[in-house]
Image (cartoon, rainbow, N blue to C red):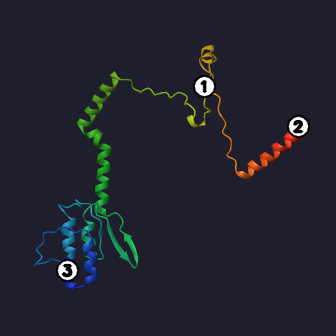
Amino acid sequence: MQELYSTKNQNAIEIAKTFERRRCNHPPTDPIPPHECIKSIVNIDGENKHRYVVATENERLRYSLRKIPGIPLVYMNRSVMVMESLSKASASISRNMERGKLTGGLNNAKSGIVGAMDKIKNDGENEKPTKKRKGPKEPNPLSIKKKKSKVEDNDEFKDEGQKKKRKRKSKTKTKEDDDVDNENSEKLVEDES
């Protein structure tokens, strides 16, 4: 950050402030070059403890970080972002770890004992656990037609009470309807006589 402040490029300073900053414990009064600061943050006891990915244009920094295993390096080539292939240090560490996994059971006495103890514990139990058998499934309850309830025909229910007769309410008549009804009734009376 101190290097950016010395350039007095306000846009770059504002952008840099938005990123997460790592304390490097270098005195701000006597700043060191940025590539040395990045190298001291990433290289802790010969390894990338915090698993940083380093993106830099500085070739000296990239060259020195290639010697440390487990540091992915990114740089710009023209306008394309390029990730470097696996460094020799990282490749040798990964090969050694794979060999250790292959021969670890043969050379390590504890792993052989643990394996034997597991076999003894498993002898008391069934070797193959029984599969849980699933029966036929029920149909979707929403697709089933509901059953009709049965009505019981008992004499007791018939005797207890009959349904009340409903009274029908007639539609309210207007004056015109009354006049038409009166005329019709008069005609009927005349026809009858």
Numbered badge on residue 149? 1
Q: Quadrant of the N terminus?
A: bottom left
For the residue pair 151 and 60, the one nearer the viewer reads as 151
Left or right: 69 with respect to 152? left
Residue under label 3: 3
For the residue pair 193 and 45, the one nearer the viewer reads as 193
Residue under label 2: 192
Q: Amino acid at mark 3?
A: Glu
Q: Position of residue 45 (x, y in %)?
A: 17, 60
Query: For the residue carrying disc 1, how many other residues have a C-alpha within 10 Å: few (<14), some (14-19), or many (20+)?
Result: few
Q: Secondary structure at mark 2?
A: helix
Q: Quadrant of the C terminus?
A: top right
Numbered badge on residue 40? none
Q: Quadrant of residue 66?
A: bottom left
Left or right: 34 with respect to 84? left
Mark before the other along the chain sequence, 3 or 2: 3
Answer above or below: position of 73 versus 138. below
